[in-house]
């Protein structure tokens, strides 16, 4: 699944998030998905014009796809966690579900006519993603690195354990 955004001209902006190696989970697929989120956050900032009609039209055009992408990403992570019997799975899944609930509430608010301030969503997403990646996602990636191997094409696999 690809996140289809139509980025505006990317001007350097201090609000934007720039990918750095410190965000890497060591798993290519997950890194690509995180990069997709970062591009989306930056696109939200780019479309935060302060003109309510423009912001509404943009929000309406992207939010469903963004939620689908978030669900897809969370499912990817959860599959890896389950496959590796990661101890923090339940707590992590809960955080994902809570995030989706928050976003769905935002959509409900939007649909019921509440004033939309796009920049507010952009900041919320930025903070949530950076905090979540640096905290919960890093903790599973450290665990994966301990028990797994990553092939040269970036694909993740569990190394066979030696027989006791
Ligand atoms: Fe996560
Ligand atoms: Fe993640």
Image (cartoon, grey):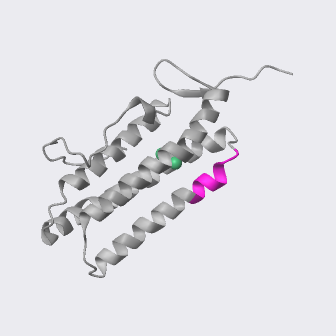
Q: Nearer the viewer, residue 47 or 107?
A: 47
Name above or below for residue 116 compared with residue 31: below
Q: Is residue 134 left or right of residue 119?
A: right
Q: Nearer the viewer, residue 100 or 127?
A: 127
Q: Is residue 146 left or right of residue 131?
A: right
What residue do we see at 32% from left, 62% from top?
121
Any part of residue 82 in sight: yes
134 falls in the magenta region: no
Name above or below for residue 146 compared with residue 55: above
Whole-percent x, y for residue 111 in the image: 30, 77
Which residue is outermost to the bottom?
Answer: 112
Q: Which stretch appears magenta? A: 87-94
Q: Where's the N terminus, which quadrant? A: top left
Name above or below for residue 118 compared with residue 32: below
The quarter of the displayed image where residue 2 is located: top left
Any part of residue 2 in sight: no
Q: Magenta stretch: dominant SS? A: helix
Q: Where's the C terminus, which quadrant? A: top right
Q: Is residue 164 left or right of residue 12?
A: right
89 falls in the magenta region: yes
Whole-percent x, y for residue 76 in the image: 51, 44
Whole-percent x, y for residue 89 in the image: 64, 49
What residue do we see at 34% from left, 71% from top?
107
Q: Is residue 40 left or right of residue 58?
A: right
Q: Nearer the viewer, residue 163 or 37?
A: 37
């Amino acid at each position: 699944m690809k996140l289809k955004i139509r980025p505006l001209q990317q001007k350097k902006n201090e609000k934007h998030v720039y990918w750095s190696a410190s965000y890497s989970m060591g798993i290519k697929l997950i890194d690509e998905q995180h990069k997709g989120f970062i591009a989306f956050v930056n696109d939200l900032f780019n479309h935060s014009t302060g003109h309510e009609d423009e912001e509404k039209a943009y929000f309406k055009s992207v939010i469903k796809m963004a939620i689908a992408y978030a669900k897809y990403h969370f499912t990817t992570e959860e599959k890896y966690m389950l496959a590796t019997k990661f101890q923090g799975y339940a707590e992590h899944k809960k955080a994902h579900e809570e995030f989706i609930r928050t976003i769905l509430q935002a959509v409900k608010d939007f649909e019921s006519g509440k004033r939309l301030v796009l920049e507010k969503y952009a900041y919320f997403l930025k903070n949530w993603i950076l905090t979540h990646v640096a905290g919960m996602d890093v903790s599973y990636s450290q665990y994966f690195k301990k028990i797994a191997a990553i092939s040269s094409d970036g694909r993740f696999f569990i190394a066979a354990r030696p027989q006791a």
